[in-house]
Amino acid sequence: MKTLLYVYIFLIGLTSLSAQANGVSPYLPLKTDQLFELELEKLSSIAKLPILTKPYHAATIYKYMTKVKNSHPALYQRLNAYIKRYKKAAAITHFSAQYNHSFKDDTLVANQRGLNIDDSFKFTSGSFWQVNEHLIFNGGGTFYDGEIVPNNSYVSFGWDVFQVDIGYREHWLSPTQEGALLMSTQAKPALNVTISNPELLTDWNIKYEMSVGILEKQDGIQFDRDKDPVSGKPALMTMHLSFQPLDWWTIGFNRTLMFAGDDGDISLKDVWDGIIDPVNNDNCGGDGTELQDCADEFGNQQASISNKFDIAPFDFPMSLTYEYAGEDTKEHQNYQLGNIAQNFGVFIPYLTANTSLNFEYTKFHSAWYVHHIYAEGYSNDNVKMGHWWGSLKKPDDGVGGSAMSLRFNWQNIGSYQVSMLYRSAEFDPSTLFNYKRSQELEISLEKVTGSGFLGAKLNIGEDSLGNKFVGSSLSYRW
């Protein structure tokens, strides 16, 4: 793992010196345009796209679209029609308005940046202005019931091998579609600085991504148990490195580091030591670590190994995903992950000519999304930043459990598109609460109109506390 980090840093230094590189790229939608994002996932599977994070760089998608132009002309045409708006110097790329009505108790909507099912309306937008080849201003966000989330607002500059984004750029550190273990759109994004490469490097299609951001203010931060808890804004660092050793297999390595937030000083050396030696900087006490003063702990770290296998047995394309993640180290060894979570997925882009199917199953050991230093846990604005499963248990409960989702999409029924999603979550026995099995069914229908989509959605279910909910929405999306 340490060697990979050195390679990671070397690549960043190398690419920054690339004087002959092309310009930066805008990003495509993430959890804002369900139908177009389904087309992107189909392309990812069929063209064996070697990307394990989202949002996708538009430049990367341009390149891989040509691979399906002859084999899947309808998919190519739909992608090309949408992406044309990104080929302009400036454009409003997305706008949607949604009215919601809830008939029962409140619950968080999965992967929607803290949106509740009873928030009466939601507006989303995205736009960009490409000043020149090396500078893009992006504007937009999400607005619901008095809450403004500027998730599409940031400035991008640099080159295609070293792009810098400053602002509220989002991160989805997983090849999955419904639930990401380390970082998703469940919570609002942090104000951050991100570096990444739209142009994949070498014949191994190497991709790197790294961000550093500041979370919203949290209460109950306590590094030193001899002092009272304080309030502050923790920092969050994310790291990703992936490559494609075979044309059907992409593997990636991810880290998240949540640190600081109290009144103590932190140096670059502290950050570096936390990255390369978590055992002796995060694991306080015991014979296997040099860290005995718990007041000197660095913070909260997670890591994962993610895989995507794009295969086509009997000319039947599908993508298999597998993630192995740890919330801690095992037996005080930097190279071993502890408190494991595993994520399995199967995506079939063409179950039939007009249908697709996605299935995901996740199993969590203990201590996920909670931490002894941060009373609010691995969260931003009181919403867990990883898998939606984490928001269904009490914020300070380290109980384990499992989650599954099954989505079926049916396209081109005349001018209608139908999507059905079933989610379920279960929890191990807990000392804090007697959890029930959580279940949710979502049915959405969209009709193609002259220049956009008119949509209706119904959500019914029961949360982990036994509260039933029913929600409906009407929307228009351009």
Image (cartoon, rainbow, N blue to C red):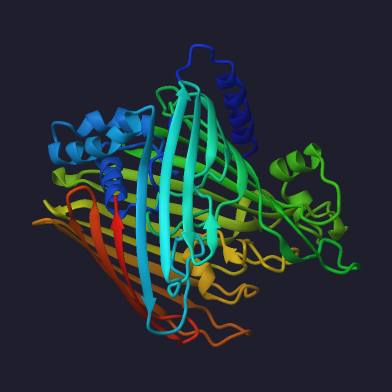
Q: Could you say where residue 57 lies in the image, as x and y percent from the top left?
A: 41, 35
Residue 210 location in percent, x, y? 58, 38
Q: Is residue 200 visible?
A: yes
As drawn, is 199 to the left or to the right of 386? Answer: left
* Residue 455, horizontal then vertical, whole percent: 25, 62
Q: Residue at x 53, y 70 (%)?
A: 391
Report whether 383 appears left or right of 404. Answer: right
Q: Quadrant of the N terminus?
A: top right
Q: Nearer the viewer, residue 279 or 50?
A: 50
Residue 368 appears in the picture as rendered: no
Residue extending farthest top: 20
As displayed, is residue 112 above or below residue 436?
above
Q: Nearer the viewer, residue 368 or 167?
A: 167
- The answer to whether residue 63 is above or below residue 237 is above
Q: Nearer the viewer, residue 299 or 461?
A: 461
Q: Is residue 74 left or right of residue 295?
A: left
The vertical placement of 231 against 259, above or below, is below
